[in-house]
Image: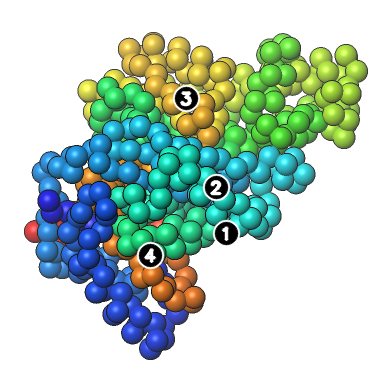
Amino acid sequence: MALSFRFWRLNLLPKPSLSHLQTTLKALKPLKQKLSPICSLPMSSSSLNPLNSHLSISKNPTFSEPHNPTACPQDDLVVLGIETSCDDTAAAVVRGNGEILSQVVSSQADLLAQYGGVAPKMAEEAHLQVIDQVVQEALDKAKLTERNLSAIAVTIGPGLGLCLRVGVRKARKIAGSFNLPIIGVHHMEAHALVARLNERELQFPFMALLISGGHNLLILARDLGQYIQLGTTIDDAIGEAYDKTAKWLGLDLRRSGGPAIEELAREGNAKSIKFSTPMKQHKDCNFSYAGLKTQVRLAIESENINATIPISSASSEDRRTRADIAASFQRVAVLHLEERCERAIEWALKIEPSVKYLVVSGGVASNQYVRAQLDQVVQRNSLRLVCPPPSLCTDNGVMVAWTGIENFRMGRFDPPPPADEPEDIVYDLRPRWPLGEEYAEGRSEARSMKTARIHPSLTSMIQASSQQQP
């Protein structure tokens, strides 16, 4: 079987030095060795270029992409996925047939409660303390060792750079020590694709709404690696709005703001406070939650709610007021999602009339109110809602491993790193990394969106590489 890497997913940016150049040249030799104890894949070393900036394209590729991406028996693949993009340290082992052999997540809930949100440096230190244990536990639960693995998949962006680095360093250490190929995974692609692990009828093209603490993204997934961005947030994501509202209402953040708000909102009157729906005047699919956050904060201040008094100690009247605010906030926050999804479905069907599914994934997709409201949207449009189980909506290693498997079959992976990788290596992490190219009608001139495009989108990188193939 012959596979080729379409682009260099996990670049290295070493500090230029003669010793490093010598190490790099030595590192080319192991590429001819057997890459996996389960599925041996011959690869070309021509794609290896550790001095590339963002994209490496082989001018004289040895192999072409196979027409049959599943030529390697899917049951034979065993991939370890590592996820450290934000505040959870996660690892999982998944087979090519979708069997989850293990899943381990170490939460930073206590840190979230202490700091009222994610503190990047504290999060990095928490990752460093548990990463070895989490990975080893994932292997132990799967009753495997590193020698049984076919490849390592790891999130390289988007996310917090300090946190991403912990996972990438661990992944490269294992891959180098055991001569395993490595797959750099886009965090948002992983949230979208994990739905295909459980829902085998989910074929391209499909739509996806990816909602979490740091992201609001509406995409049309035309094929693996081929995404059109229909809408994104121009400031804050819905998960951030949930977390801040929960903090201001004095709720327990150890479970994160979403579950806390949803639970309290059941006690309240969702129409008691007339919050304005964001961006009603903008006929696009982009999101904004900064203004709604301000409305909520002003409402809380006007009611003289003291967030230092936890909800468990609040008077019955105070609790009722907080519940009304929570319910009113949730109604408008989700209504914003509904309106954007309605328009996005209309756009998507113009581009791909065969779309039948809307995938809703990401941490906020665990919210039952969100699911119920969006289910009404898709039913009105004769589509079907697909949501991963809650354990696969929040950040996890399974989604990274599965996305690694899907890309591995297409030859989109990197060769094993050298076992003695230099200490001065600087990883090409992608904290801000768009998933797809913006749909023309949905393009925004918002400054926050312009500055966010630091790396070329995943889709544009794959397209550029494909055009270079003979």
Location of mark 3 (residue): 389
**Relative to 141, is 456 above or below?**
below
Q: How is the image coloured?
A: rainbow
User: Is residue 412 toward the left or the right of residue 379 in the image?
Assistant: left
Q: How far apart are marks 2 and 1 (CA)?
A: 18 Å
What amino acid type is highlighted by mark number 1? Leu
Between discs 3 and 1, the one toward the N terminus: 1
Q: How far apart are marks 4 and 1 (CA)?
A: 21 Å
Hey, which quadrant is residue 289 in on the image? Answer: top right
SS under mark 4: helix
Residue 50 locus on image (x, y percent): 34, 72
User: Is residue 319 toward the left or the right of residue 236 in the image?
Assistant: right
Q: How far apart are marks 3 and 1 (CA)?
A: 29 Å
Q: Which residue is drawn at 71% across and 35% down?
A: 254
Location of mark 2 (residue): 134
Location of mark 4 (residue): 176
Between discs 4 and 1, the one toward the N terminus: 1
Residue 27 locus on image (x, y percent): 30, 74
Q: Residue at x 47, y 24 (%)?
A: 389
Can residue 350 be seen by looking at this rendering?
Answer: no
Location of mark 1 (residue): 162
What amino acid type is highlighted by mark number 4? Gly
SS under mark 1: helix
Between discs 2 and 4, the one toward the N terminus: 2
**In the image shown, does 103 or 457 lie closer to the viewer?**
103
